[in-house]
Amino acid sequence: MPTYRDPDIIAFRAFWKQAVPNGYAGLEPVDRYRETFDAQNAAIPPAPGCTVEMVQFGGCKAERLTPAGGGGNGILLYLHGGGHVFGSALSHRHMVSRLTDAANMIAYVPDYRLAPENPYPAGLDDAGAVYAALRQAHPGVAIAVAGESAGGNLAAALVVRLLQEKSALPSCVYLLSPWLDLTQSGVSMTAPAIDDLMISRQSLEDCAAYYATDRDRTDPRISPLFGDVTDFPPLLIQVSSDEVLLSDALRLAENVALASGAVDLQCWPEMVHAWPLFHPMISQGREAITQAAAWLAAKCVR
């Protein structure tokens, strides 16, 4: 196992192991899993001065987060993570509000439908409907698409589908610790040097079974890693060297680069999966938010 040097990571790993001493124990009951995740994250306040409004776009409920600066740098469609099974606009409000505040963009975070009640393509359809509605509501305004983990899956799958349909693309895409291959074929899934505190191949398999059901998991709208990424918009990926999803991020970055796309890959040592979600405890999470926000603003302001 790696030897950790970052004091925040050392403290966070000790905290997590104490809070979850037996590790992953399954997703059931799903309702309780969702309630606990929302309650824990909702306790963290949003960025100071951020206005939170409940709205509806494309038939999907969402939160609109307007930063204290007014959000003049464009629109951010953020798709939350949670394995396609849990997570919500509420659970991610604290992180997305800081991202949108630092970027001075207005964020929309939809409560897309979740599995197992609503498996693929429900979540992707909701993401597409919200994106189309935002384009209609904000003509001529730059729209970025972002997401972490399963939300990164939806963000990348949305772009792959837009490319297939030859539809208008977002100005840029930001993916944090994205889950891009639901077949779990990446070498980091079993690499002995990987010490993933947060997720495992088994937890991903359980989520994938709920979301993909009996569909072909190599379908690029389910596993966007297998899609044609020719003309993919400018892409930023942040991933930890210590997570099982490392290979997903590396392979997508390679695919986009080989297709002559613009890709910025940041591989952060020692971090946990989706570490900006834990910004109150991990200073590198705050730094990752700052860097991602600067990238988003630069790509959306012309």
Image (spheres, helix red, strand yellow):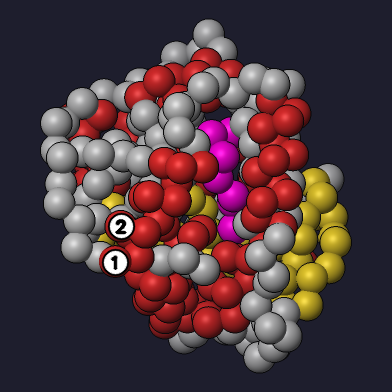
In this rendering, is residue 141 above or below 23?
A: below
Of residues 267 and 254, the one drawn nearer to the viewer in this rendering: 267
For the question of whether residue 207 can be seen, the reply is yes
* Amino acid type, label 1: Pro
Residue 133: image quadrant is bottom right
Q: Residue at x 25, y 60 (%)?
A: 268
Using the image, determine if residue 132 lies above or below residue 135. above
Q: Residue at x 45, y 33 (%)?
A: 21
Q: Is residue 100 visible?
A: no
The residue carrying mark 1 is 7
Residue 103, image x and y in percent?
A: 52, 80
> Is residue 101 positioned above or below 159 on the image?
below
Q: Are marks 2 and 1 in contact (CB under 8 Å)?
A: yes
Which secondary structure, mark 1? helix
At horizontal 69% and vertical 70% (from top left) the residue drawn is 45
The front one of 154 and 65 is: 65
Query: Residue 39 appears at what percent x and percent y?
Result: 73, 49
Q: Which residue is mark 2?
A: 10
Residue 128 position (above or below residue 125) = below
For badge 2, the amino acid type reads Ile
Q: What span is in magenta?
A: 78-84
Residue 206 is a magenta residue: no
The answer to which of 26 and 3 lies nearer the viewer is 3
Mark pair 2, 1: CA separation:
5 Å
Q: Residue at x 52, y 68 (%)?
A: 280
User: Callout 1: 10 Å neighbours few (<14), some, many (20+)?
Assistant: few
User: Could you tell me how many numbered marks the image carries?
Assistant: 2
